[in-house]
Image (cartoon, grey):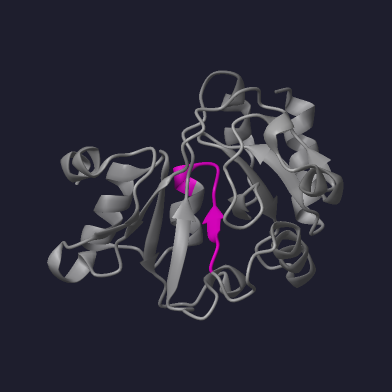
Amino acid sequence: MRPEQVETFERCISVGGVALFPADTVYGLATEPDSREGVDRLYRLKGRPPARPAAVMFFRLELALAGLPELDGHTLDAVERLLPGPLTLVLPNPARRFPLACGPEPDRVGLRVPDFRGELALLAGMSWPVLQSSANPSGGSDARRLEDVDESIRRGVDLQLDGGELPGTPSTVVDLTRYEDDRSYEVLREGAVTRTELAELL
């Protein structure tokens, strides 16, 4: 990964393009969160139902906290314990930010902040948030390598970034929407972080 590739990635997102990129888990698709055209293209590439929520990814934790300023109290503490890392957190969204990512539930938003290391560390320089989803046909296998991504998806994107071979296990999805009230949470999908590891972190 080179600095100029990160700059190209950011330019692509800023104009509503769709990019194929490496996360800290698997390869993903990204677009500008407020671009209806970009979001529609991303969903069509995956064959994903339009009403299904996606996550918003920030590339540094401080940017995520600035982008979701309503987070406070126990929920903010949980976010700071868990991120960055291979988790997707479903959080309260009282200001209804990033509506295109929220699907039919605008009061909830999915948040990702990857833990980029090694050759991927430069991606933490991205200042633009993205709406993101895994780079596979809906319901298909996650891609560990760029060449594992379905050819129709690779042909349909505006930019491809090769980050080499990734761990290959998707993020763990955790619902924290009730955490502020009673410290409860629900694992919606167990992935790179196990239930036991999550309990220890929280």
Taking depth in this image into account, of 89 and 192 the one nearest to the observer is: 192
Read off the magenta span. Answer: 53-62
Relative to 32, residue 171 above or below:
above
Residue at the (63%, 71%) spot, across then down? 49
**Residue 62 vs residue 174: left or right?**
right
Residue 81 location in percent, x, y?
A: 28, 43
**Residue 185 vs residue 9: left or right?**
left
Residue 200 location in percent, x, y?
A: 17, 39
Residue 56 location in percent, x, y?
A: 55, 57
Q: Is residue 49 magenta?
A: no
Q: Is residue 54 magenta?
A: yes
Taking depth in this image into account, of 115 and 44 the one nearest to the observer is: 44
Residue at the (41%, 39%) spot, across then down? 84
Q: Residue furthest top?
A: 118
Residue at the (46%, 36%) spot, across then down? 169
Relative to 25, residue 101 above or below:
below
Q: Residue furthest left?
A: 182
Number of numbered discs visible in the structure rendering: 0
- Quarter occupied by residue 155: top right
Relative to 76, residue 158 above or below:
above
Quadrant where the image shows the N terminus: top right
Residue 146 location in percent, x, y?
A: 70, 31
- Quarter occupied by residue 195: top left
Residue at the (60%, 50%) spot, across then down? 140
